[in-house]
Amino acid sequence: MEQCRCPWCLGTEKMIRYHDEEWGTPVHDDRKQFEFLMLEAMQCGLSWNLMMEKREIFRSCFSDFDYDAVAAYTEADVQRIMEYPGMIRSPRKIQAIIHNARRFQKIREEFGSFHQWLWDFSDNCTLLYQGHSLGNIPAANGLSDRIAKELKHRGFKYLGSITVYSHLQACGIINDHLESCFRYGEILEHYPTRQLPADKEG
């Protein structure tokens, strides 16, 4: 029997695999957090399908998402990445990724880990907002506003509230799988979840 999935992932095998195996699964690993943040920053103005298609290129260009290695990049690395076959040739985004890796390190220095700093915003629970499981999903909310403001204060780039909301979905802080999707119930069953009414989006 065919499993029901969120409609946005249907179309390519890479998108389906990303949905089934990663999107919405709580991430408590800094390297994966950095990878997802990097993908979100690169995606600005582009499609998520393109990010999945170019993911292996990003891995090759950015030291397999090793934030310490990326933080040490120089202008020579920017040029190397710009010349990599198939890479998105945006020097501003590439420089922002390197800059964000350095900001990422600062949060790790202050709090021990980036993922714990981020999960503290949800009291270490996945959030399930009323109405989201039926498809009433906002582009951003009060929580993403707060986190985006804090990231901006800490010097991060290309991470506004809409981009941050997408990251919270991807790393499992917000469960925005549809109730009809098989992943919705799996996350509810296996991870601590706090249900909130729609007026508690902040």
Image (spheres, helix red, strand yellow):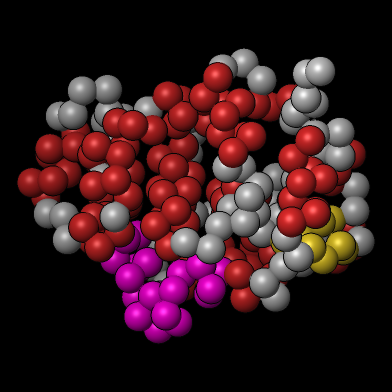
Q: Residue at x 80, y 34 (%)?
A: 181
Residue furthest out toward the front: 1
Q: Is residue 12 above or below residue 189?
A: above
Image quadrant where residue 146 sits? bottom right
Q: Position of residue 195 (x, y in %)?
A: 86, 62
Residue furthest out toward the bottom: 110
Q: Describe residue 191's horizontal placement relative to residue 58 as left or right.
A: right
Q: Is residue 147 above or below residue 23?
A: below
Mark yes or no: residue 149 visible: no
Residue furthest out toward the left: 76
**In this picture, which residue range is highlighted in magenta?**
100-118
Q: Position of residue 4 (x, y in %)?
A: 80, 26
Image quadrant where residue 81 sits? top left
Q: Describe residue 108's horizontal placement relative to residue 185 as left or right.
A: left
Q: Position of residue 161 (x, y in %)?
A: 60, 55
Q: In what quadrant of the picture does the N terminus appear?
A: top right
Task: Decide whether residue 111 is among the magenta residues.
Answer: yes
Mark yes or no: residue 110 visible: yes
Q: In what quadrant of the picture does the C terminus appear?
A: bottom right
Q: Position of residue 114 (x, y in %)?
A: 46, 70
Q: Describe residue 22's horizontal placement relative to residue 99 as left or right.
A: right
Q: Residue at x 69, y 64 (%)?
A: 143
Task: Decide whether residue 202 is among the magenta residues.
Answer: no
Q: Main secondary structure of the magenta part?
A: helix
Q: Is residue 133 above or below residue 180?
A: below
Image quadrant where residue 66 sits? bottom left
Q: Describe residue 131's horizontal placement relative to residue 32 as left or right.
A: right
Q: Residue at x 56, y 57 (%)?
A: 27
Q: How many marks?
A: 0
Q: Residue at x 56, y 34 (%)?
A: 18
